[in-house]
Amino acid sequence: MEILTAVIIVSVIGLIAGLGLAIASKVMAVPVDEKAEEIQEVLPGANCGACGFSGCSGYAAALSQGKTTDTGLCAPGGAEVSEAVAKITGLAAGSVTPMAAVVLCQGNKHNTDTKLNYMGVKSCTMANQLFGGPKDCIYGCIGFGDCVEVCPYEAIHICDGVARINPLACRACKMCIKTCPKGLIELMPLHEAKAAVLCNNHEKGAVARKQCKAACIGCMRCVKACEYDAVKVENFCAKVDFEKCIGCGKCHEVCPVKCIDVIEPGKKITAAEVKAK
Amino acid sequence: MKMMLAILLTGILTENFVLAKFLGICPFLGVSKKLNTAVGMSAAVIFVMVLSTAVTYPINILLVKNDLEYLQTIVFILVIAALVQLVEIVLKKYIPALYNALGIYLPLITTNCAVLGVVLLNIENSYTFVQSVMNSLGAGLGFMLAMVMFAGVRERLESCDVPKFLQGLPITLIAASLVSVSFLGFSGIIEGIFG
């Protein structure tokens, strides 16, 4: 008899709880934004924030609620995602130029020396606070790999003390750009030959030269050589305007330290070309 | 009043659920990697602990009346699980900000041993209703204290030069045991104050 009361009490409590939950979930159902969920499934799901919204769900919600009509904001997804999103939302597909991040520094172990024996935490942000890092050049890549850690696509590696990005693995999410304490990383159009100044040293020529063998000395020869007005020198460091540059390579020819170079992110290099370099 | 304060402080310091009673170790080790997740988890635990104590107290009276004390564990698991689900539905509908803040942690603690433990211990200590709620609050706050402290310890551990064979979970367990030992220092303090 006693077991019966026990069974009844537990069953009744279970029944009440179950019914209560069933009713509650019906009464207080929150309408799900189906369009947003559909968009979110198309998005890459890296939550990198390159679109300017709080992760992929934020961008999906903004698109479905009409807060933005630009379907081309997702840099990692590129044109494919833009088209897929446009199909769901009925908006026009945005144009996405595929980009890849490039580290603008050649301050490897051969080109620059170390000024202090850094023993602290292996983090660029930390090392940067101590006299701007262990290398002689305080503008260059520290090489502890904060960008390597933050990259969701494992596209970055430290080669010879300088971060290098595999342009084909890079999805242009800008995570590394936000992380780099020296601001050395920039996006360049993928598969397009453009000249880039692989240096960020703003010291005067003589000082810069002492800090790093590959430092831009601000000699202005590239500015004079450029026929398209694409190169500017500011604070003793040249800068290329990628929109104006056609990748003719005249600036590279005249550069005395060869810190300006024509790069084509994603280009396949043959073994002969590697030997020639 | 003095009694209430004593119960509250006992729950936070001397009888800390994680560090003295070793309940709720899984979230303690699992979610304490970062400070903000630790705070989110502990907030959800405090909330659920107090709420489930308030709900299970009258149910226990019902069980005692029918001589069914041995059903406490199974009935409480049932009730707490249903309650947390209900709270989740209500929060999702009316306070989406809090729902997003608690996020995954709310359903995670549906059958957390710390939550069930505090409810059963309240009965074992034959606390009154107010005392039970106070004890749950203390236990929850103690959980938060342990989580937040340990999250700090772990964030420091991240940048430490740990020998290879101790990296990861082993050093975390050692650190946890040291934090737990340090809490032994509180033993007797409550009797000293309220004695």
Image (cartoon, grey):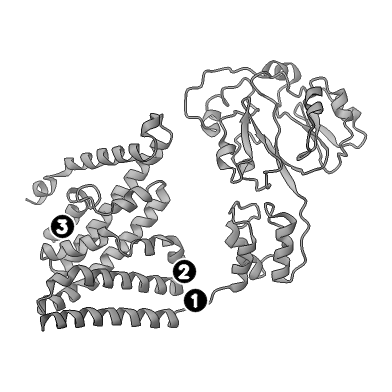
Q: Mark 3 lies on which chain?
A: B
Amino acid type of the residue tagged 2 in the rendering: Pro
Q: Mark 1 lies on which chain?
A: A
Nearer-N-terminus badge (2/3): 3
Quadrant housing the N terminus of chain A? bottom left
User: What is the x, y in percent for residue B33?
Assistant: 40, 46
Q: Look at mark 2 in the image and give the residue it sits on.
A: B96
Residue A207 visible in the shown view: yes
Q: Is mark 1 on a helix, strand or loop?
A: loop
Residue at (62%, 68%) from the top-left corner? A38
**Above or below, B182 relative to A82:** above
Amino acid type of the residue tagged 3 in the rendering: Ile
Tell which tag, 3 or 1, sits nearer the viewer: 1
Residue at (19%, 76%) from the top-left corner? B59
**Above or below, B164 relative to B138:** above
Question: Label 2 near label 1: C-beta < 8 Å?
Answer: yes
Residue A54 visible in the shown view: no
User: What is the x, y in percent for residue A206?
Assistant: 74, 16
Q: Which mark is residue B7?
A: 3
Crowding at dot 2, Cα within 10 Å, few <14 / some 14-19 / many 20+, comes out as some
Is A227 placed left or right of A184 in the picture? right
Q: What element carries label 3?
A: helix
Q: Quadrant of residue A223?
A: top right
Is B69 placed left or right of A232 in the picture? left
Q: Is mark 2 on a helix, strand or loop?
A: helix
User: What is the x, y in percent for residue B12?
Assistant: 22, 52
Residue farthest toward the left in the current orientation of the protein = B195
Q: Quadrant of residue A36?
A: bottom right
